[in-house]
Amino acid sequence: MGRVIKVLKLDTKPGRRRADQGRALVAGGAGFLGSHLCQRLLADGYEVIALDNFHTGKRYNLSAIARDASFTCIRHDIVEELPTDLAVDEIYNLACPASPPHYQADPIHTFKTSVLGSINLLELARRHNAKIFQASTSEVYGDPLVHPQPEGYFGNVNTHGPRSCYDEGKRSAETLFFDYSRTYGIDVRVARIFNTYGPRMRPDDGRVVSNFIVQALRGDDITVYGSGTQTRSFCFVDDLIEGFVRLMNAGVAPQHPVNLGNPVEFTVMKMAELVIDYTNSRSCIVHRPLPVDDPRQRKPDISFARQHLGWEPKVALSEGLAHTTAYFDAVLGGRRFIAPRTVQASTVREATA
Ligand code: NAD
Ligand code: UDP
């Protein structure tokens, strides 16, 4: 049974805001995306319960909303049986480490989180007739042979590599969501999220945007894995959260997963150069080995989201990097190394280590 970190009973708190939208449960609510979603749902008038095992999530991600009378946080691992008295109207399942080093640290638990955790949350949805949202991923396309990736593409995924615990776990979760929908008539919404960045990523998260910004601010080498010719498409967190809310509130539930991401594609090397330029860092670019099964290209086809949700990203990479850099600057305590560079941003130094 989960441990309640803070409970403020809605019906006993004087002067509380009316939670007129109902009660939403956010599994993974202390994480990067989850904490932004909790904040958005509170602003929209929901009572919000965050459920998190704090594996990669942090309490300080919730500091902006911790005192909100309509907010509760419960420490709980979704792999374990959920509290049965958790009556909710809407469930968002964001619980799962998302960064390759974190999800590969305990691959079996990552897989259980996507499969057993999804079953536990789907059962909760079934018990309370709640609408349920799944944070799936562009990783279900694996190393895609179709570019850009539309929702109809079935993907090219290794079943037994180091990324498989995440990719195959998320694919299994999609199967479970649509089987629960067909079998029990549950209202499910499944978003395939492409690389998203922004404030509240952990400095040690290990993903490319946070790594590059933290390295640039510290004046450390920027670690490009492989040649840097692999591509990703980067979405700012505020845009993505808007997409979540639109998908959850769409009048008709799409009977398939929906891509949510920014279709503007960059090479990893270009991202390194942009971050160095943006931060005016003295950092050099070094190369490290490309991780096994690292997808070579990725760019969402968001035609469905554009047409049916009226959604598309609005925040340009330059603006998103400004917000994210300011966040990491504050988190690192202003220990930013600003010095005139003696090398060009495009200078590439081979790693010696
Ligand atoms: P994150 O690691 O910051 O957040 C995940 C949260 O889930 C953390 O708070 C963590 O403690 C919690 N968690 C993990 N396992 C749990 C468990 N078994 N029980 C309860 N809580 C658990 O990652 P994020 O970037 O915020 O990603 C959130 C969700 O979105 C994940 O499901 C991820 O797969 C998905 N996603 C994210 C991206 C992205 O670019 N950020 C891309 C694709 C998919
Ligand atoms: N990457 C990199 N340097 C880093 C971290 C990541 O070159 O310090 C590369 C990684 O190999 C991948 C891309 O950046 O090609 C995106 O990696 P990330 O872990 O952010 O997300 P994912 O691989 O899950 O898309």
Image (spheres, rainbow, N blue to C red):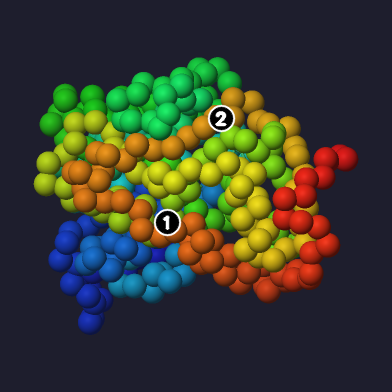
Answer above or below: position of 241 versus 286.
below
Give left or right: position of 236 versus 217: left
Indicate yes or no: mark 1 CB to ligand 1 under 8 Å: yes
Q: Can residue 344 be seen in this view?
A: yes
Q: Is the C terminus in the top left, top right, bottom left or bottom right quadrant? A: top right
Label 1, secondary structure: give it: helix
Q: Write the residue at 16% across / 25% down.
A: 182
Q: Write the residue at 39% across / 38% down.
A: 300
Q: In which quarter of the image is residue 4?
A: bottom left
Indicate the position of residue 122 as horizontal and vertical percent values: 27, 36
Indicate the position of residue 274 as horizontal and vertical percent values: 61, 55
- The tag on residue 237 is 1
Q: Mark 2 points at which residue?
A: 296
Q: Is residue 85 visible?
A: no
**Amino acid found under the numbered disc labelled 2:** Arg
Which mark lies nearer to you, 2 or 1? Answer: 2
Q: Within 10 angstroms of label 2, few (less than 14), some, or many (20 or more) residues?
A: some
Answer above or below: position of 142 versus 334.
above
Name the foreground residue: 135 vs 78. 135
Indicate the position of residue 179 as horizontal and vertical percent values: 23, 24
Name the foreground residue: 125 vs 244. 244
Answer above or below: position of 115 versus 66.
above
Give left or right: position of 141 versus 191: right
Q: Quadrant of residue 349?
A: top right
Label 2, secondary structure: give it: loop
